[in-house]
Amino acid sequence: MDAAPHLGTTADLEMRTARVADPALGAHFVMFPPAGQYPQCWFVDLTRRLTAATELRDMIDNVRDAEATRVYLQTIPALLELLRSIDPAFQKDTPEYQFRRVIVEILQRLAPTEGARSLVSVVFPGMLHLLRHDNEEIGVACCKTLSEIIRTHRTLPEELISQFMVVFQELAQNIPSLATEYLSEDSAELEIKVVLPSMHSFKVLKEMGIVVSAFMRDQRQSIVALIQNSLPLHFEVLAVEAPAQKKARENYEAMGGFWSGMSESIRNAQAYSDLILAQVKVSSS
């Protein structure tokens, strides 16, 4: 049986980073080509790229020397551009979904580090782009990355905070219609293997509420005015009630009862739970 690959040197990092872009590159580190110029073979051997990306993710915590930092500073913008250049995936059981997920996990580990401080003006907008365009699992991961960046960087440009609040407001504005779509008596059941778009997700709204709380803790002076401007939208989100739940509650109360719990007519119980948790986080932000 072949020996396990040695992990732990800067050369290993360079080799695997190259293979994420093109498995044929071998051990020669070559930066990713510009957006839109990926060769046709990009779509041919995704399995090998996924293997290389997984190995790269697993070795990050074990290589922290100065040369590794240089590689990481090259890798972060390249991975963000890579994610922008290939289509999002919304089917969990596909290699495309797994590949994007691993790339985001690499960014989760690298972006909040001290060595990546100089890249915050690249990473932060990159996370916001994924929040707008990718699936909800990646959206959640992006929010966790943003929270870590806020915690470790402390002072961020007000422009980046404002950009985040714009995305937060866009998602918050979707919540009433999403409650009708997912939580009515005649709503279709959500498929287990299909991941929702990030901007159609109660789960992502919850995580964005956590990011707002992080801003309130560490960037209070910059965020207060932006929060005040969006307070009417906060209250609108808090007033949202699942239509199936509303009907069950009103019918029960009309008979003199006091309703508690989730209506049995709600077909997407997880989405209902995510909505309630999102409202809790929005109310505390």
Image (spheres, rainbow, N blue to C red):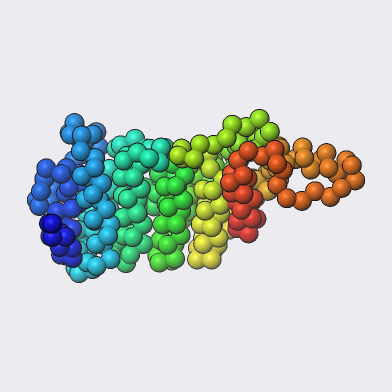
Residue 60 percent across, percent down from the top left? 26, 62
The correct choice, above or below, for 42 with respect to 233 in the image is above
Q: Quadrant of residue 44?
A: top left
- Can residue 226 be seen at all in this image of the molecule? no
Q: Is residue 158 above or below residue 155?
A: above
Residue at (63, 38) in percent of width and height: 267
Q: Residue furthest right?
A: 256
Single out the residue that lies furthest toward the bottom.
Answer: 65
Q: In this view, does 99 lie to the left or right of 239?
A: left
Observer-nearest of 188 and 158: 188
User: Does residue 40 sit above or below 72 in this rendering?
Assistant: above
Residue sitting nearer the eye, 119 or 6:
6
In the visual, does 242 lie left or right of 248? left
User: Residue furthest toward the front?
Assistant: 1
Q: Is residue 169 above or below residue 220?
A: above
Give the mark count. 0
Locate residue 20, reporting x and y percent.
21, 47
Image point 88% across, 40% down: which residue? Answer: 254
Please name the residue shown 18% across and 63% down the image: 7
Q: Image quadrant for the C terminus?
A: bottom right
**Image check: 183 left or right of 42?**
right
Residue 141 placed where, x, y %? 42, 52
Asked which quadrant contains residue 112, the reply is bottom left
The percent coordinates of residue 54 (x first, y second) are 27, 53
**Residue 50 shows in the view:** yes
User: In this rendering, would 74 be left or right of 202?
Assistant: left
Quarter holding the N terminus is bottom left
* Residue ID at (16%, 60%): 4
